[in-house]
Each structure stands twice: as C-alpha cells, then as structure tokens.
Image: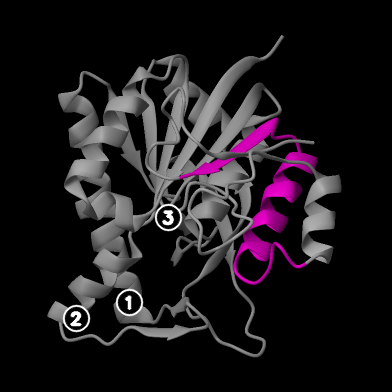
C-alpha cells in the first residue's frame, strides 16, 4: 500500500492576508505524513513591478511575462514570498526548504509556443524530478515550491501555480498515493456563484458533465476543473478545492474523485 502524500497549493491573496495565512499554516503543520506546499503570488509581483516602474500587462487574466516581469517574478516568488513562507514554517518547528524549478532540475519546462498571444517567459512543465523530491521528503523536510520552472537550457520561466502542483502530484503518484488541495477564495465549486454556501460537496466525471451541460458550472471554473479531472485520470487519487479553511477537519469544500 502506497504512503499518502499531500500537495497543497495556495494563492497570492491568502499569502498577503497575514491573519489568514497564519491560521492556514497552523492547519498545515497539523497534517501528518509527507507534504508539499506550492505557492503563487501574482498580486505581490504586480505591486513590486509598479514600484520599480514596470507596467504589468494582462490578457484575459493571464500575465504577459517580458524580461523585466520575469526578473520581478524571480525576486518576488523565488525570494521574498518563498523564503517568508519557509521562515514561518521553521518558526512552527517544521523543517522546510524553498525551491524553484531550477533547483535540482526539479521542474523542467518548455517555453510556451507563440500562437495568437505571445506570453513571453511562460513555461509549461514537461518533467518532474521525483527522485530529488523524494530525497527531501525522506529527510522529513517540507519542499516549498514557487511557481517558477526552468528549461533544459537554464532559462527561468513563469509557470501557473495550479499546473506546478498538478504536475508534481501526477509525477509523485507513481510512488505515493497523492492528494491535491487547491486553496483559493471560494469554499469550493458553487452551484450559485452569488451564494458562498452553495458548495457542491463531491464531483465525479458523471455529475460534472451533467452540471456543465445544464450550465451550472461555466466560464472560469471550466479550465480549472478540466485540469483537475485530467490529474485524476493521470494518477492523483483525490483533489480538494476550498478556501483558507480547507485543511480543517470539518471544513466545507468540494472533493473531486474518479
């Protein structure tokens, strides 16, 4: 029987809220067994870029990462936010190590092809160095990944944090039973976007397709959930979507299963 490994991804808005982040960290350290933390931080990167006089360009909610933006992202994701999170874990007696894709060649990616839009220095993960991650877990350490990957040629690339978490969970599922947690602002997948309490407790491919056909699930949730079900098909045992309380025992959230 495979050992359970939990991969938790947190977004920038949670990181920026000191009280919420501290509460989340208290829940995170209570998780037993091996665990991995993945974080984004787009809002902070935008803020720092503005202070440096760089304009942030977005298209359909996606960041265009030019050379200046990539330098800021490396500083903010790989430096300020990553090391702040590691320090918070150390303060809670949790031995952690901060990483990006270049460390140990752990997340090798390719630069996204230019089609209708040139996203610049944006990468899509091609391979995960599971042996490297496993060596860290075997030392009872917590890997904390920023959303930065690296090409074989050594070019750092901005990479979607959800994708980083998913690819790590999929790759590690060969040796572990992997569960993936996405922490965002919503309690889960909602039947009514205006009602925070209309959380769908469990989704499988059958009821998901019915909810899509009936247009209960639309727009922004579709690509996220498509990626979730792809991860399930590729070996992840379960995925949980919820807010900052999703690690609490009696939290309200959405669980995605086969």
Horizontal side of residue 54 vs 107, given as left or right: left
Name the front one of labels 3 and 2: 2
Q: Which of 216 and 106 is in front in this view?
A: 216
Query: Does residue 197 appear in the picture of this structure?
Result: yes
What is the quadrant of the N terminus in the image?
top right
Across and down, in percent, residue 136 comes to 43, 24
Q: Which of 211 and 158 is in front in this view?
A: 211
Across and down, in percent, residue 14 comes to 31, 50
Across and down, in percent, residue 229 comes to 74, 48
Tell me the tag on residue 147: 3
**Residues under labels 2 and 1: Cα distance?**
10 Å
Across and down, in percent, residue 211 comes to 78, 57
Give the mark nearer the N terminus: 2 vs 1: 2
Tell me the tag on residue 50: 2
Q: Which residue is drawn at 27% across and 50% down?
A: 15
Query: Within 10 angstroms of label 1, few (less than 14), some, or many (20 or more) residues?
Result: many
| Label 3: which secondary element | loop
Q: Which residue is drawn at 48% across and 55% down?
A: 161
Q: Name the residue under label 1.
A: 69
What is the quadrant of the C terminus in the image?
top right
Q: Are marks 2 and 1 in contact (CB under 8 Å)?
A: no
Q: Does the magenta stretch include residue 216?
A: yes
| Label 2: which secondary element | helix
| Label 1: which secondary element | helix
Query: Compared with residue 120, is residue 226 higher up or lower down, i.e. above or below?
Result: above
Horizontal side of residue 236 vs 146, given as left or right: right
Q: Nearer the viewer, residue 183 or 75?
A: 183
Q: Residue at x 83, y 56 (%)?
A: 209
Name the front one of labels 2 and 1: 2
Tell me the tag on residue 97: none
């Amino acid at each position: 029987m495979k050992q359970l490994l939990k991969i938790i991804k947190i977004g920038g808005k949670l990181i920026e809220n000191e009280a919420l982040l501290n509460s989340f960290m208290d829940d995170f350290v209570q998780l037993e067994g091996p665990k991995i933390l993945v974080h984004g931080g787009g809002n902070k990167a935008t803020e720092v870029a503005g202070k440096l006089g760089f304009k942030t360009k977005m298209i359909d909610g996606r960041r265009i990462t030019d050379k200046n933006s990539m330098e800021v992202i490396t500083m903010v994701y790989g430096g300020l936010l990553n090391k702040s999170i590691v320090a918070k874990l150390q303060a809670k007696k949790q031995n952690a190590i901060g990483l990006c894709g270049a460390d140990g060649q752990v997340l090798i990616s390719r630069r996204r092809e230019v089609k209708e839009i040139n996203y610049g220095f944006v990468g899509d993960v091609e391979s995960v160095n599971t042996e490297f991650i496993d060596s860290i877990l075997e030392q009872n350490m917590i890997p904390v990944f920023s959303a930065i990957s690296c090409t074989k040629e050594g070019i750092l690339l901005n990479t979607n944090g959800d994708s980083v978490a998913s690819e790590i969970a999929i790759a590690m599922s060969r040796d572990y039973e992997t569960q993936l947690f996405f922490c965002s602002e919503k309690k889960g997948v909602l039947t009514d976007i205006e009602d925070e309490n209309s959380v769908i407790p469990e989704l499988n491919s059958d009821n998901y397709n019915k909810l899509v056909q009936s247009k209960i699930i639309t727009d922004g949730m579709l690509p996220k959930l498509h990626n979730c079900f792809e991860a399930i098909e590729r070996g992840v045992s379960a995925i949980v979507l919820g807010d900052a309380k999703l690690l609490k025992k009696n939290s309200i959230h959405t669980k995605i299963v086969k």
